[in-house]
């Protein structure tokens, strides 16, 4: 069992740091030592040439910013010595998904087109984390522009791998973030979730991932994918850490007109209050869905993996044992349309956001002389974009074309209303179900093997089947570790709640953690940490 | 892998339609890449075909984002004031080619209007 500082939770480290039992520099050193042990060689955009050792390393980061983190750690230690309060996350190592601009760091979106872009400003969420004393360890790898659910589409390879078994993907798109936290290469990470990009990789890597309510956390400085769906949020090793991080990043921001003016509670205050009397729903529509058969690709009605269903039902039993009221058979009939609608809405928004990459103002420009501007665009995009951004632009343009807009885009926005209405009915305090939360599996399957799905964009998209409805509806959702499958890979269970109910979701999640703290699977560690020990 | 939900016979996006999209997007694709992307596009369109069959109740409004923004939670718009960027050099430094603080681009095709 590893007992390094970098394996401790943020709240445990915060207590040790406050008591003066360890220094921020010691915490940083422990994290850097772990990175040297498990991370592997730095990724690059050069054509991928596999090397011995690549396949058993994690490859969570694109850029490691050790000098920045060291300056921050020294400042935290000095502040503490001077009797000052260095902040809520003082001395806690954090990985920032490389979709956030962080001043003076390469901010690449895992794309060649931004490989040489050094951000001239810092995203609000990151600014708040650094102001709270967090140590910015580096920029975590991701799918190119967040477009994927496995991290295999990154232009920076070797791509991240799953610390539980490096033959498997970490999920995506915040896969570098969740792999880093699972492997102790960071204690926390800031991710983003557009269809499940925090929760799905959190489930695959056995960590906690929270997608806040849309508008709860500012998007300023986030390189946009689908602006009506993108949500920054925490990746952490436990629920308390996710709550702690929310205390820092949540709240209005004059630089983001969608950051809601809703007071930020202390998300750690009620974590231990239990769930007595809370109403938690189960919906058959989250256990049996239409999605492509993983072997044949055929779209058909099928159940989620039996072990995942069993873990979710066990969570319901445990919560009932703590006094929660479990409400069965909550109808969520429009869940199945989440992916088709997402194929339309997210692509239209992505196409709109990606047209700015043209080789003119910043980022990659085709290095040879060209005769005219449009040729510059074509050559720049050819060299700068991988297949996923190209595909998303083409799809977005097609479904928003004048002749198809009503059939696809407008229709999808109406179906989105119907998806939202399912949640409104389930959570309505005066309705039939009066739910505080809906309990579901996070994913239909556990992590898949590297190379098994990548390339098939339809099958890959369906990895977000159970997470994407929350993005359409704007509501918060959290994935928490719910056990291990027979093959040793983690299972995630998900809680979804009404707008701005993050505190309740965290409280239910914390109750579940307490119920399972002695379960044998809790003491199993990811393979990369036990190999050779 | 997903051949069963593909099928070139009923492809919605033909090669010529695809080439038009590629031109509009200002892309330049290799032949293999073009065929892969067209195949995936058609696969995605097949998987969203069920949208056409959804019974959408009369009068349902569109949702542009899920969370409502009533006046009490909607951020007030800022005054429309110009604020000088303190680090404009940092931004200009990102430009691939500069001349006297102007960004250089190749010729922009144009026609003389008569």
Image: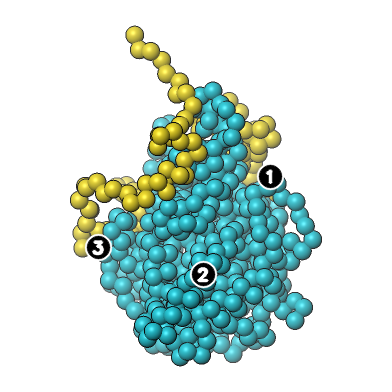
Chain colours: A cyan, B yellow
Residue found at x 42% / y 69%:
A129
The chain identifier of the residue carrying mark 1 reads B
Tell us which disc is closer to us: 1 or 2. Answer: 2
Quadrant of the frame with the N terminus of chain A: bottom right
User: In the image, is A181 to the left or to the right of A243?
Assistant: right
Q: Is residue A475 visible?
A: no
User: In the image, is A266 to the left or to the right of A315?
Assistant: left
Res. B73 mark: 3
User: In the image, is A139 to the left or to the right of A455?
Assistant: left
Q: Secondary structure at mark 1?
A: helix
| In the foreground, A154 or B46 | A154
The spot of residue A432 in percent (x, y) is 34, 71
Q: Are marks 1 and 3 in contact (CB under 8 Å)?
A: no
Residue found at x 70% / y 46%:
A47
Of all residues, the one furthest to the top in this rendering is B114
Q: CA distance from mark 1 to mark 2?
A: 48 Å
The residue singled out by tag 2 in the image is A69
Is A13 above or below relative to A460? below
Q: Residues within 10 Å of mark 3 (few under 14, many from 20)?
A: some
The spot of residue A275 in percent (x, y) is 41, 85
Residue A222 occupies which quadrant of the picture?
bottom left
The spot of residue A513 in percent (x, y) is 51, 83
Residue A229 occupies which quadrant of the picture?
bottom left
Q: CA distance from mark 1 to mark 3?
A: 48 Å
Tell us which disc is closer to us: 2 or 3. Answer: 2
Is B15 above or below relative to A208? above
Q: Is residue B64 visible?
A: yes
| In the foreground, B43 or A368 | A368
Res. B3 mark: 1
Q: Secondary structure at mark 2?
A: helix
Res. A158 mark: none
């Amino acid at each position: 069992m590893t007992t390094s500082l970098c394996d401790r939770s943020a709240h445990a480290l915060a207590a040790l740091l406050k008591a003066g039992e360890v220094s921020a520099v010691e915490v940083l050193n422990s994290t850097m030592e772990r990175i040297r042990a498990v991370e592997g060689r730095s990724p690059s955009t050069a054509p991928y040439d596999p090397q011995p050792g690549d396949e058993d390393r994690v490859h969570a980061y694109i850029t490691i910013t050790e000098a920045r983190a060291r300056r921050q750690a020294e400042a935290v230690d000095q502040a503490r010595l001077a009797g000052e309060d260095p902040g809520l996350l003082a001395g806690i190592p954090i990985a920032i998904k490389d979709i956030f601009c962080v001043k003076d760091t390469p901010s690449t979106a895992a794309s060649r087109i931004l490989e040489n872009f050094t951000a001239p400003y810092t995203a609000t969420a990151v600014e708040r984390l650094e102001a709270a004393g967090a140590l910015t360890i580096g920029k975590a790898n991701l799918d190119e522009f967040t477009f994927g659910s496995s991290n295999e589409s990154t232009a920076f390879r070797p791509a991240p791998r799953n610390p539980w078994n490096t033959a498997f993907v970490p999920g995506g798109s915040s896969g570098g973030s969740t792999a880093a936290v699972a492997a102790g290469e960071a204690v926390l990470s800031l991710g983003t979730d557009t269809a499940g990009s925090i929760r799905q990789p959190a489930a695959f890597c056995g960590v906690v991932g929270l997608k806040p309510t849309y508008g709860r956390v500012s998007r300023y400085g986030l390189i946009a994918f689908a602006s009506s769906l993108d949500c920054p949020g925490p990746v952490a090793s436990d629920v308390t850490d996710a709550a702690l991080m929310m205390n820092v990043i949540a709240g209005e921001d004059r630089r983001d007109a969608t950051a809601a003016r809703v007071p930020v509670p202390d998300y750690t205050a009620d974590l231990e209050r239990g769930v007595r009397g809370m109403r938690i729903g189960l919906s058959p529509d989250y256990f049996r869905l239409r999605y492509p058969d993983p072997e044949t690709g055929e779209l058909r009605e099928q159940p989620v993996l039996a072990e995942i269903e069993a873990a979710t039902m066990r969570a319901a039993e445990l919560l009932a044992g703590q006094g929660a009221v479990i409400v069965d058979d909550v109808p969520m009939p429009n869940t199945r349309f989440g992916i088709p609608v997402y194929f339309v809405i997210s692509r239209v928004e992505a196409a709109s956001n990606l047209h700015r990459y043209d080789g003119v103002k910043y980022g990659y420009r085709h290095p040879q002389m060209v005769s005219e501007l449009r040729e510059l665009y074509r050559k720049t995009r050819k060299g700068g974009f991988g297949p996923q951004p190209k595909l998303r632009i083409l799809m977005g343009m097609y479904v928003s074309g004048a002749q198809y807009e009503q059939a696809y885009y407008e229709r999808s926005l109406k179906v989105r209303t119907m998806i939202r209405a399912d949640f409104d009915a389930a959570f309505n305090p005066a309705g039939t179900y009066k739910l505080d939360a809906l309990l579901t599996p996070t994913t239909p399957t556990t992590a898949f093997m590297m190379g098994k799905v990548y390339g098939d964009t339809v099958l890959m998209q369906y990895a977000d089947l159970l997470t994407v409805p929350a993005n359409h509806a704007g509501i918060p959702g959290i994935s928490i570790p719910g056990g291990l499958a027979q093959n040793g890979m983690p299972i995630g269970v998900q809680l979804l709640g009404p707008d701005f109910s993050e505190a309740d979701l965290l409280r239910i999640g914390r109750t579940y953690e307490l119920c399972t703290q002695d379960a044998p699977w809790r003491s199993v560690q990811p393979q990369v940490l036990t190999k050779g020990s | 892998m997903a051949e069963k939900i593909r099928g070139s016979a009923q492809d919605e996006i033909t090669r010529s339609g695809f080439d038009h999209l590629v031109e509009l997007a200002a892309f330049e694709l290799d032949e293999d890449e073009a065929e892969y992307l067209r195949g995936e596009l058609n696969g995605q369109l097949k998987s969203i075909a069920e949208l056409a069959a959804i019974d959408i109740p009369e009068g349902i409004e569109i949702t542009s984002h899920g969370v409502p923004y009533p006046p009490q939670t909607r951020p007030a718009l800022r005054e429309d004031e110009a604020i000088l960027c303190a680090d404009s050099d940092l931004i200009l430094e990102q430009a691939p080619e500069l001349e006297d603080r102007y960004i250089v681009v190749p010729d922009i095709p144009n026609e003389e209007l008569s």
